[in-house]
Amino acid sequence: MKVVALVSGGKDSCYNMMLCERHGHEIVALANLLPMDSGVDELDSYMFQTVGHQLIGAYAQCTGLPLFRRRIRGASVGKDLSYQETDGDEVEDMLALLASAKASYPEIEAVSSGAIASDYQRLRVENVCSRLGLISLAYMWRTPQVCLFDDMLDGGLHAIFVKVAALGLKPKRDLGKTLEDLKETLHVLREQFGCNVCGEGGEYETLVLDCPLFKYGRIVLDKAEVVVESDDPIAPSGMYHPKEFHVEVKSAPGAGKEIDVGDESCAALVKGADISQFEREHKEAISQASSRIRVHKSNGFIHVMSEGISANQGGSNPTDSMQVKGCMYSMLSSIKCCLEENGIPWLQCLFVHMYLADMQGFVHANSVYCMFFPGVDPPSRACVELPLEQGVVCALDVLASTDVDVHGDWPRRVLHVQSFSEWAPCCIGPYSQGTSAGGVVYMAGQLGFDPPSMMLPPGGFRPECENAMEHCQSVAVAINSDVKKSAISFVVYVSKETLEDPLFVVEGNGLASKFLPHYGWWDGQQTDLQSFEETINEELDPYLLPPKLSQSIPPLVIHVCVPKLPKGAAVEVQPLVIDARKFEQLVGHGSDDVKKLERGVAGDQKYDSDLEVIHSFRQKSLYLEKFELRSGALTVQCRVVSVSDTVSKMHMWISSGGGGGDNADELGQLLSRGVQRFLKECGLGWRDICIARAFSRSEFSPVMKAALDRMNGIAKESNFGRLECAFAPVLELGKSMAMEDTAVLDLQSNLGWNKTRTEDIS
């Protein structure tokens, strides 16, 4: 891609330019923001480094590239972590600067910036990029600083310290020194005081005088002055004010020039979704589309399900762009109306499942999706192709909180990284990597991309699955969780082509034991659920380390085979994880006694002798149980994980063996009994179930739907109300990679044990 690079003069912005070129992009222009008053070294800015701005004009000569410069009119007005367009904010100066570069060089597609650990800065760059239709490239994002610092030196970056403000750094001693000069000092300060080696805590700032991108010259600083801002004996601070410099020519001068950016309007370049225009251009497609909508309301949540149906005279075509767009518009409009009727804005949505009848329609479906969901703090999402019913082009279901305060001390938080980096795949658009609420993290489905290129690696399932699981962990750590220890459940989608690989099952089981060390608990393997120690990489910064947990959870896992996945991927992994702080808060209370029951009939006479507990575990706030329900030849195996008042989850598996599987009435009764036991053991009411989702082999779907109707009929007789269930027909599914089961009912509650309620206590 053609790239405009934001440059402050610091090592980070310059090194990210070098990484952009390393990843095959071309820097075609530079962009810099500087103070209104040339005599001012540093602004009170949350966003921009300006120390050393007097030398930045020389970057045009050194690189041979055009340098767009704008004086900062605004200030740090919007100081929240997330950013939305704000008059008078310095971010709007960045918008004007980059818009001018884009207007002069329309071929520009991306922006380079030096973000390493600051969400505040990254989110603002991404906001501007989104508004201008550009891609953010932040290849250093969440890279270990020790490694990054060494890479900068090895890459030929020559920079000097122009500001110091940290314990152990002294203005008169250290200002003007190079990165190499102070390397050992920074490592010592890291060990002694937790200093950020790359200065991410504001410990210091640098000015690059030479690097491989400076093809035509290097900057030589002839005269500078040390300005001490504070002579505090513990942590003095000061700046290095350049007074005289010159450019030492390396080769024939390039074509670089400095371009001043004024107050020209950039409105024409700002991108935005225009639903009215879409409605005018797609009037016929919208008129031929309709949607079926169902709603499940629970304590604190609403789950809205919709199917998009085309009434095109030529028949439904899930690859036809107009039909897909019309159906998506119809569904999203219906969902929007439903949420509004219940007083719920999009920003209270937590997770979206998007199902397509044909993955070729993804681009068209996604274009409509982007018009409805907010660009700031959007919900997480998973998208797969399913063998939907005839006439259904696409389907959506949305989980949202009904009350913004329902989560108390654990409000909704979103991790939405839109920048290309080496950390994890970016989410460009209104869908995030993870949405946390009430201590539960709803993580987006992860594909096995190579993050810097956003391409799938060669080799198929194994490398993709390894990448996807590593991405899940990277996202979990960034949002204060750990998929190896505090994951409640996973849905692992694999493509039909992948399932046909004879090595799939063997490789899949091997990867499961590697990434999910406690999953074998469900099959009776001896595993210590007390948290296990892992080797800690000493080079990792504290914010890159997984949280320490005293307990581990054997997660529930659903393996599903679908026709296709986005980008032709072999696998997509979707975890549900507990926030580490919430998890430790919960498991730190209650009794330490471990109560286990192995192979026994439940003692409560409410459940007859056809219920057998295979094994169970209770300790503090963690409850695990595997039990089976039988009726004649029909068996339903149930697996339960419950973590106090955070989340309870049950998978009810119907296997293909044993016969009797086509008896919907009998199956419905078993499902009802399983649900009642789940609610009773977890201290829940019927209305505490916030999500019910059934995965079923396509040929078994009519039986499964009839069984769910029977289950709801029994519930109605007990005045419990109806449990609306999202339904996902699939090719194959199972508790293991062998995919030997017929259907599974997945139930989830985000409220828990012994909570006081005024209605519907089972």
Image (cartoon, rainbow, N blue to C red):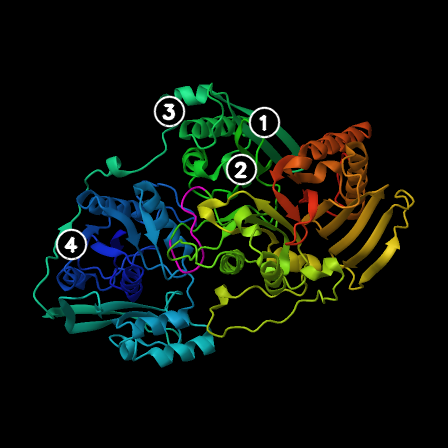
- Residue 761 is one of the magenta-drawn residues: no
Magenta-highlighted residues: 420-430
In front of the other: 318 or 750: 318
Which residue sits at x=30%, y=63%?
22
Question: In this figure, which residue is indicated by the disc labeled 4?
Answer: 66
Residue 366 shows in the view? yes
N-terminal of the pair, mark 4 or mark 3, is 4
> Are dots 1 and 4 in contact, CB under 8 Å?
no
Report the amino acid beneath label 1. Ile
Instruction: Give the structural element (helix, strand or loop) at label 4.
Output: loop
Residue 475 in the image, given as x and y percentages of width and height = 51, 56
* Residue bearing mark 3: 276
Count residues near mark 3 (Cα–Cα under 10 Å), then give few for <14, some for 14-19, many for 20+.
few
- Left or right: residue 488 compared with residue 352: right
Give the total number of marks visible in the rendering.
4
Disc 2 target residue: 355
Mark 1 or 4 closer to N-term? Answer: 4
Res 503 → quadrant: bottom right
Three-letter code for the amino acid on which mark 2 is drawn: Tyr
For disc 1, the marked residue is: 293
